[in-house]
Image (tube, rainbow, N blue to C red):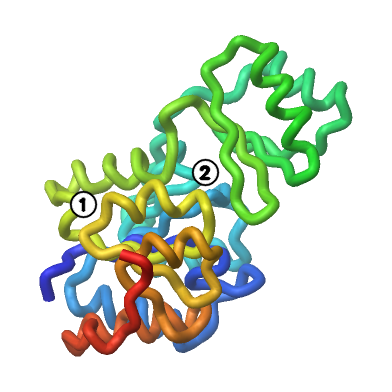
Amino acid sequence: MRYRVFATDFDGTIATDGILDAPTIAALQRFRSAGVICCLVTGRELGDFANVDAVLALFDYVVAENGAVLYMPGTNELRVVAPEPPADFLAELTMRGVPIRVGKVIVATVEPHENTVLEVVKQSALELQVIFNKGAVMVLPAGVNKATGLQTILDMCGLPFADVVGAGDGENDQVFLDHCGLSVAVANAVPGIKERAMLVTEANAGAGVVELIDSLLADELPSLPKGGN
């Protein structure tokens, strides 16, 4: 098999309502047993997962907080690759009534608070970016995203993006999918992701990922329908 790395989003891609089902877990284990390096690439904070240790143990590497935090489950090594959010920025959002969650780097809220967030970012004169994903609103340092986080992991492994098959479903996945040797959208992905993906699965979320993994292991990718590219 030509692809040496599998990089996947979590919510809406391998998980539904935050839950990984047994067939998806088994498929990930089959992939790793075949020698494929499995990377979770998510906007979530590390502590957000139910049964966090069991979920993260399915992966060789984890890119969390949309690229700002890297975690190696095998060694329990944690790397924060971007600065924490400024206290005055957080205070201004709170004063304006924006409900926020703060990770090691990421600041997260939900629509319809994006306009207030954008105003505060502009007024703060800080190099921050606002990222949208299916109703979620994330603030990160400029230049930090899923692609930059995954690139760091690939550099550690000495592998190029061409060796990566990536799977996703939401707007914030496009930035890393565009770099992958094979980009795959699950059937429930937003239209823009499906239009630009090289392949689109027939099934939704976890079932679509099982379909993808089994097709890769059996070298039967042509059986999958193509996306827009």
For residue 161, the mark is: 1
The quadrant where residue 51 appears: bottom right
Task: Specify the amino acid type for callout 1.
Answer: Phe
> Which dot, 2 or 1, sits closer to the camera?
1
Task: Specify the amino acid type for callout 2.
Answer: Glu
Q: Position of residue 45 (x, y in %)?
A: 57, 48
Front residue (pair 180, 35) = 180
Q: Residue at x 49, y 59 (%)?
A: 192
**SS class, disc 1:** helix
Q: What is the spatial separation of the Cα atoms under label 2 and label 1, in whole angstroms?
A: 20 Å
Asked if residue 110 is positioned above or below residue 189 in the image, the reply reads: above
Asked if residue 112 is positioned above or below residue 75 in the image, the reply reads: above
State the quadrant of the N terminus. bottom left
For residue 65, the mark is: 2
Q: Position of residue 155 (x, y in %)?
A: 19, 42
Residue 38 seen by the camera: no
Front residue (pair 86, 123) = 123
The quadrant where residue 52 appears: bottom right
Q: Residue at x 44, y 81 (%)?
A: 208
The quadrant where residue 93 appears: top right
- The furthest residue to the front: 228
Residue 197 seen by the camera: yes
**SS class, disc 2:** helix
State the quadrant of the C terminus. bottom left
